[in-house]
């Protein structure tokens, strides 16, 4: 098996090299998940860095990242494999035209061989990669339904998938599995129980500043501090959708693009769409409310 970090501190450092800033608690579950070979289940609000951690982990470990993006109506078979129907048709026509002597059985066996198999994420993840087993990201599992969960539970249980025409394909080395959920619904206990669970919360001021420093290094300290203090206050406000870390980063980039060196009520009004994505939330934060929050944020920094 390829090298994995030997301590929680090493996990933190490895992720930091990928510009992913994680707290001790997250580094601990990542470490344990690698050490024990258990899937990592991360739940939290949108934009808190759940998807990104799988990317950082794959890059840090030098593994392939295989992503299964979940959606409503995703069914088990299309998550595993598909037959390359057009290629099968062409090959059949060619066989017919040449009037070859191949028996019907031989032809069918040929058509349903690996040459015509299109691997989808769950099957791909069973294949070894150059640096070792890949990282399998099963993203936004809450978007699928219970039958799919049940199927996943089985696939993750023994790390094997079955293609009826080919038989069972088993991972020599199990993939490193990361599941995420934005918690639009509760994921079933049975699936959670198989995993190590971590709730990904919004970062505190200090960590969010570190994230900005890593992701938007061009931003001056003053601008970053004001942006973070402002966004942190927005998260306590009565909003329909609270801004995530992704929004903080976007906002800082927008402000830089406008050459802003500090926040002002005007510049906030012009750029609020980078932070808030619902008109009601934006309307609530326009004008005097933004000025009030900015004053509070400044007082806190000073
Ligand atoms: N701890 C972190 N360190 C560095 N960047 C982060 C962190 N958390 C979030 N981000 C940034 O926020 C963006 C959105 O994160 P993402 O993983 O897509 O959120 P989620 O999957 O939770 O909705 C990422 O592209 C990344 O740039
Ligand atoms: Mg995500």
Image (cartoon, helix red, strand yellow):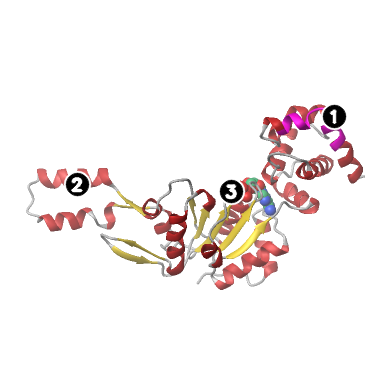
Of circles 2 and 1, the one toward us is: 1
Of circles 1 and 3, the one toward us is: 3
Q: Is any part of residue 295 visible from this angle?
A: yes
Please give the label number shown on residue 137: none
* Residue at image coords 89%, 45%: 300
Residue 177 position (above or below residue 74): below
| Residue 291 relative to residue 26: left or right | right
Q: Is any part of residue 257 visible from this angle?
A: no
In terms of secondary structure, what is the magenta stretch mainly? helix
Q: Whole-Å distance between the Cαs marked 1 and 3?
A: 33 Å
* Residue at image coords 53%, 60%: 188
Residue 219 position (above or below residue 131): above
Q: Whole-Å distance between the Cαs marked 2 and 3?
A: 45 Å
For mark 1, what is the residue? 288
Please give the label number shown on residue 91: 2
In the image, residue 171 lies at what x, y percent? 41, 67
Q: Dot 2, crowdedness within 10 Å: few (<14), some or many (≥20)?
A: some
Identify which residue, 250 or 167, lies in the foreground: 167
Q: Dot 1, crowdedness within 10 Å: few (<14), some or many (≥20)?
A: few
In the image, residue 111 lies at what x, y percent? 21, 53
Among numbered discs 2 and 3, the one appearing first in the sequence: 2
Among numbered discs 2 and 1, the one appearing first in the sequence: 2
* Residue at image coords 7%, 47%: 99
For mark 3, what is the residue? 184
Residue 197 position (above or below residue 48): below
* Residue at image coords 75%, 27%: 270
In the image, residue 179 lies at what x, y percent? 54, 57
In the image, residue 233 lies at what x, y percent? 80, 43
Among numbered discs 1 and 3, the one appearing first in the sequence: 3
Q: Secondary structure at mark 2?
A: helix
In the rendered image, the quadrant that contains the C terminus is top right
């Amino acid at each position: 098996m390829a090298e994995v970090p030997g301590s929680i501190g090493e996990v933190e450092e490895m992720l930091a090299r990928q510009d992913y800033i994680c707290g001790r608690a997250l580094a601990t579950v990542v470490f344990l998940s690698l050490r024990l070979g258990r899937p990592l289940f991360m739940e939290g609000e949108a934009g808190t860095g759940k998807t990104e951690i799988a990317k950082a982990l794959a890059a840090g470990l030098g593994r392939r990242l295989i992503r299964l993006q979940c959606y409503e109506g995703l069914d088990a078979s299309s998550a595993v494999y598909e037959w390359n129907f057009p290629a099968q048709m062409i090959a059949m026509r060619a066989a017919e035209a040449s009037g070859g002597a191949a028996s019907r059985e031989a032809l069918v066996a040929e058509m349903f061989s690996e040459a015509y198999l299109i691997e989808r994420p769950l099957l791909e993840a069973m294949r070894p990669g150059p640096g070792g087993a890949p990282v399998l990201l099963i993203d936004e599992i809450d978007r699928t339904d219970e039958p799919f969960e049940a199927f996943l539970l089985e696939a993750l249980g023994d790390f094997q998938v079955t293609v009826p025409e080919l038989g069972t394909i088993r991972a020599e080395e199990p993939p490193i599995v990361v599941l995420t959920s934005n918690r639009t619904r509760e994921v079933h206990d049975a699936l959670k129980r198989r995993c190590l669970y971590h709730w990904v919360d919004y970062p505190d001021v200090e960590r969010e500043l570190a994230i900005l420093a890593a992701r938007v290094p061009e931003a001056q300290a003053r601008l970053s501090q004001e942006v973070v203090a402002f966004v942190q206050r927005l998260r306590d406000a009565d909003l329909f959708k609270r801004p995530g870390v992704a929004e903080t980063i976007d906002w800082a980039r927008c402000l830089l693009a406008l050459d802003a060196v500090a926040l002002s009520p005007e510049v906030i009004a012009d750029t609020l769409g980078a932070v808030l994505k619902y008109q009601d939330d934006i309307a609530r934060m326009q004008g005097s409310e933004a000025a009030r929050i900015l004053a509070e944020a400044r007082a806190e920094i000073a």
